[in-house]
Amino acid sequence: MLEQDICEVETTHSKAIQEAKLNLPRDEVVLKLSKRFKVLGEPTRVKILFAVSNRELCVCDIAEILSATPSAISHQLRILRDLKWVKFRKEGKLVYYTLADKHITNLIDMSVKHAIE
Amino acid sequence: MLEQDICEVETTHSKAIQEAKLNLPRDEVVLKLSKRFKVLGEPTRVKILFAVSNRELCVCDIAEILSATPSAISHQLRILRDLKWVKFRKEGKLVYYTLADKHITNLIDMSVKHAIE
DNA sequence: CTAACATGTGAACAACTGTTCATATAATCA
DNA sequence: TGATTATATGAACAGTTGTTCACATGTTAG
């Protein structure tokens, strides 16, 4: 940030600035939070979560449902697996995925109803 | 999607697939939903929302708080304005921003506490 | 064993996005 | 009026990301 970009309002509002700085969550917390939201910021992943929220589905099922390639779905599932938002069960060649817990769909449902008009 | 990418599991799981397809929210809804989540998927925007959730702040204040340039903040504020997540009030040269309503911070708070461990 | 198939994964590519920079606009002050 | 300052905004650039493609792995059937 260059010198010219610093506003002079700073001194006037220093009290509000100081207060806001203190109330701001730690960088680590914000980063973790936004990282999770970003995962929900992709239609494909939201659809996958919706699809596996009520029943067990294998990768090909999900691909068929979303009209996508199994490869694309597999890539997205890895992200959801890493976050432990979905769990999986192998059965022969197939791998069945389910929602790890109801928290995520609750969040989505709540978002639909309240926060996001 | 090429022929080779279509799985043969389809016929076996056709019932589950059909059911999942019906339960899936409309594309329009999912798109709108994930679009909003994407906005929260950026640390800068989350920080801005936190900052203006308790007090009125001008662009330079926010820039100072987040250690960013006023220009970068202004760009992000436009996105938040378009979504009507923040409201603003002009006073001379300064433009003061506040949270439009408590729904968004509620969502974030809830996410911190419940859905997102 | 070999062929077929479901899934996983790395590389490559295209599309998107946040920041910076330059500049415009609007308001205040000398 | 002219200078300064706060904010807005378009273009450019760099970094990120989702999909596709090719291929590897592992399992089942013949």
Image (cartoon, coloured by chain):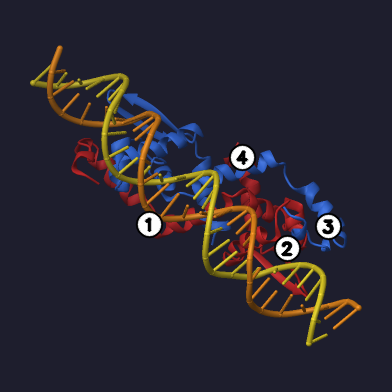
Chain colours: A red, B blue, C yellow, D orange
As helix, strand or loop, the secondary structure at mark 3 comes to: helix
Marks 2, 4: nearer the viewer: 2
User: For the residues tagged 1 and 2, is the chain the same?
Assistant: yes
As helix, strand or loop, the secondary structure at mark 4 comes to: helix
Please state if B69 lies on the left or on the right of A2 as rendered. Answer: right
Residue at 49%, 32% (x, y): give it. Answer: B82
Q: Mark 1 — residue?
A: A27
Residues marked 2 and 4 touching at CB (< 8 Å) = no
Subunit ID for the residue under disc 3:
B
Type of amino acid at the residue the image marks with label 2: Val
Give the answer, above or below, for where B52 lies relative to D22: above
Of residue D3 and residue A49, the one placed in the foreground of this image is D3
Neighbourhood count class around disc 4 (C-alpha, 10 Å): few under 14, some 14–19, many 20 upward = some
Tell me, for residue B32, which label it has, or none.
Answer: 4
Marks 1, 2: nearer the viewer: 2
Task: Determine the CA span between mark 4 and mark 1.
Answer: 28 Å
Of residue B34 and residue B3, the one placed in the foreground of this image is B3
Q: Mark 2 — residue?
A: A59
Neighbourhood count class around disc 2 (C-alpha, 10 Å): few under 14, some 14–19, many 20 upward = many
Marks 1, 3: nearer the viewer: 3
Q: Quadrant of the C terminus of chain A?
A: top right
Type of amino acid at the residue the image marks with label 1: Asp
Q: Mark 3 — residue?
A: B16
The picture places residue B88, in percent across and down from the top left corner, at: 40, 29
First in sequence: mark 1 vs mark 2:
1
Type of amino acid at the residue the image marks with label 4: Lys
Task: Determine the CA span between mark 2 and mark 3.
Answer: 13 Å
Residue at 40%, 43% (x, y): give it. Answer: B48
Please state if C21 lies on the left or on the right of A28 as rendered. Answer: left
Task: Determine the CA span between mark 2 and mark 4.
Answer: 25 Å
